[in-house]
Image (cartoon, rainbow, N blue to C red):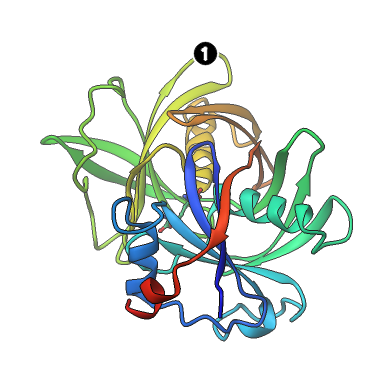
C-alpha cells in the first residue's frame, strides 16, 4: 500500500502530513521519530495525521465523528494536545483538497474543537479557544533563572520576559519546575519590540528549539498583555521563522499566520515497514 505524505510549515515550524482518513496507519512512536529525523527521515518538528474523529480512540467527547481531526505528534513521538502552527497547515491542506465546505470549518484537536478560516492570500486564522493564565514559575538557561507566567492554551506553556533574547543557548532543555509542570512544558522567551509587538524564541516540549510555536505565540501575547496590565488586545509576534498576529478577548484567542507546502510524495514502503 502506497503511503502518501505532504510536507508543510507555518512560520518554519515544519510538519509531515499523513492523510489517513480511516486511521489505518500504525503510527508508532518510532515511526514518528524516523519521519521527523532530518537525516534518516523527511525531517520535521512534528507529524499531523489527517484522520476523521471517529477513527481516533482518544479524541475528546463531543466532536462529531465526521469532523477532520488533527492527530498531532511531536518529533520525539509524544502526543500533544494542540499545535497552533500545525492547525493552520492542516486547515489549508483540507481546503486545498476540497475536504471541507467553504473557507471556515471546524477542526478536531485533543484540546477540543477549533474553527479555522482559510484566507485567499494563504493566511489562516484559527480560533485557539480559552487562554488560561496560571501562576508564576521559573526557567533556568545557562545557569540564569528567569521568572515567567504559566499559560494553558490547551497545552502547557511558561512565558518568560527577558532582556537578552539572541544570547540564549536553547540547544539543551531549559530547567523548569516539574512539580508545576509534571507533563513537561513549552518555554517561551520574549522581549518587547515596540507598541503591541514582541520578539520570541521557544524551546518546545518533545522537540527542542523550533523556529516558531503557534500556541507559544498565544501564550507569549497573553503574558505580554498581562505585563502591560491588560487582559485583552492584539499583539504581533516575531519569531525566527516569521511573524504571526494574536488577538485575545474575553479569555479566548485567535491566531493568524501563513501556512505553506513544500513537497508531496509517497513514503518508501521498505523503509516504513522496517521501522
Ligand atoms: N509547535 C506547536 C506546538 C506543538 C506541541 C508542543 N510541542 C507540546 O508538546 O505541547 C505550535 O505551533 O503550537
What residue is at 58 percent from the left and 54 percent from the top? 264
Kindly give the residue lying farthest to the right in the view shown: 102
Closer to the camera in the image, 97 or 267:
267
Question: Which percent across, then down, holds residue 158?
Answer: 37, 46
Q: How many marks?
A: 1
Q: Position of residue 27 (x, y in %)?
A: 45, 77
Which quarter of the figure has residue 33?
A: bottom left
Q: Is residue 66 left or right of residue 159?
A: right
Residue 229 point in image, percent of width and height: 53, 28
Residue at 76%, 62% (x, y): give it.
106
Q: Residue at x 25, y 63 (%)?
A: 179
Tell me the quadrant of the picture where the C terminus can be found: bottom left
**Quadrant of the image occupied by residue 201:** top left
The yes-or-no answer for disc 1 within 8 Å of ligand 1 is no
Left or right position of 74 against 177: right
> Which of the 4 quarters of the picture holds residue 256?
top right
Q: Position of residue 147 (x, y in %)?
A: 28, 37
- Give the left or right position of residue 247, taking residue 175 as reference: right
Which residue is more in the foreground, 224 or 23?
Answer: 23
Q: Is residue 74 above or below residue 31?
A: above
Q: Quadrant of the N terminus?
A: bottom right
The residue at which mark 1 appears reads as 194
18 shown above or below 140: below
* Residue in the foreground of this view, choosing between 114 and 17: 17
Q: Residue furthest top?
A: 194
Q: Could you say whether the residue bearing mark 1 is in a helix, strand or loop?
A: loop
Amino acid at each position: 500500500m502506497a503511503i502518501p505524505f505532504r510536507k508543510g510549515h507555518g512560520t518554519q515550524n515544519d510538519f509531515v502530513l499523513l492523510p489517513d482518513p480511516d486511521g489505518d496507519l500504525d503510527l508508532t512512536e518510532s515511526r514518528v521519530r524516523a519521519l521527523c529525523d532530518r537525516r534518516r527521515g523527511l525531517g520535521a518538528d512534528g507529524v499531523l495525521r489527517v484522520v476523521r474523529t471517529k477513527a481516533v480512540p482518544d479524541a475528546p467527547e463531543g466532536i462529531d465523528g465526521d469532523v477532520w481531526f488533527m492527530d498531532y505528534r511531536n518529533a520525539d513521538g509524544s502526543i500533544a494536545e494542540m499545535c497552533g502552527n500545525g492547525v493552520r497547515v492542516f486547515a489549508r491542506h483540507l481546503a486545498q483538497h476540497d475536504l471541507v465546505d467553504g473557507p471556515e470549518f471546524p477542526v478536531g484537536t485533543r484540546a477540543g474543537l477549533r474553527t479555522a478560516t482559510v484566507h485567499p492570500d494563504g493566511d489562516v486564522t484559527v480560533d485557539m479557544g480559552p487562554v488560561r493564565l496560571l501562576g508564576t514559575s521559573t526557567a533556568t538557561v545557562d545557569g540564569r533563572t528567569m521568572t515567567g507566567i504559566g499559560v494553558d492554551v490547551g497545552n502547557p506553556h511558561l512565558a518568560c520576559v527577558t532582556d537578552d533574547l539572541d544570547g540564549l543557548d536553547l540547544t539543551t532543555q531549559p530547567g523548569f519546575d516539574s512539580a508545576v509542570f509534571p507533563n513537561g512544558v513549552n518555554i517561551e522567551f520574549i522581549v518587547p519590540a515596540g507598541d503591541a509587538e514582541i520578539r520570541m524564541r521557544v524551546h518546545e516540549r518533545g522537540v527542542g528549539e523550533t523556529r516558531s510555536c503557534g500556541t507559544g505565540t498565544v501564550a507569549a501575547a497573553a503574558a505580554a498583555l498581562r505585563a502591560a496590565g491588560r487582559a485583552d488586545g492584539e499583539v504581533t509576534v516575531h519569531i525566527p521563522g516569521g511573524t504571526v498576529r494574536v488577538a485575545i478577548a474575553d479569555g479566548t484567542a485567535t491566531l493568524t499566520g501563513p501556512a505553506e507546502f513544500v513537497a508531496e510524495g509517497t513514503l518508501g514502503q521498505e523503509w516504513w515497514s522496517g521501522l
